[in-house]
Image (cartoon, helix red, strand yellow):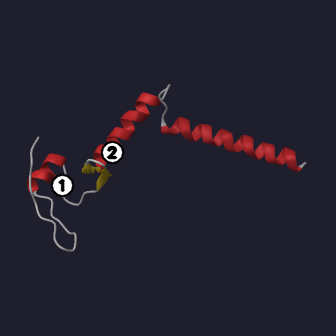
Amino acid sequence: MTTIDFRVAANGRMVLPRAIREAMGLHGDSKVTAIVDDEGVRLVPMHHRVSRARELYRQAIKTPRTTEDFLHDRYEEAERDEARSHQSAA
């Protein structure tokens, strides 16, 4: 674990030191999520959260699916919904 001290201005602004940005993998304009809990504040780069969400999704799915599979299923579902609405209108 590394400890780096830095200042927070009176208006609440702060600059993340280069060492922290590098450790977090931040380059240029980056998004960061601040997670606040009883222990304090944790900064997490958005790309880490996206990677984690993808990992959890891969663990949760039973059968790998492509975007085309998803769109095909939604198309069929829309057709079924339309057929049901025509039946109920008749």
Which residue position is annotated with label 1?
27
Tell me the distance, in whole angstroms, between the alpha carbons under discs 1 and 2. Answer: 16 Å
* Left or right of 30, for residue 61: right
Q: Amino acid at mark 2?
A: Arg
Give the percent coordinates (x, y) of residue 27: 18, 54
Which sits in the foreground, 32 or 82? 32
Q: Amino acid at mark 1?
A: His
Query: Which quarter of the figure has residue 57?
Result: top left
Report the disc number at residue 49.
Answer: 2
**Vertical position of residue 81 compared to residue 31: above or below:** above
Q: Residue furthest bottom?
A: 11
Residue plotted at (26% across, 47% down):
39
Query: Which quarter of the figure has residue 69?
Result: top right
Mark 1 neighbour class, 10 Å CA radius: few under 14, some 14 to 19, many 20 or more: few
Q: Secondary structure at mark 1?
A: loop
**Mark positioned earlier in the residue sequence (1 or 2):** 1
Give the percent coordinates (x, y) of residue 45: 26, 50
Query: Which quarter of the figure has residue 2?
Result: top left
Residue plotted at (22% across, 69% down):
12
Quadrant housing the N terminus: top left
Give the percent coordinates (x, y) of residue 72: 59, 38
Residue plotted at (35% across, 44% down):
50
* Left or right of 25, for residue 80: right
**Vertical position of residue 55 compared to residue 8: above or below:** above
Q: Secondary structure at mark 2?
A: helix
Q: Residue furthest right?
A: 90
Residue plotted at (12% across, 64% down):
7
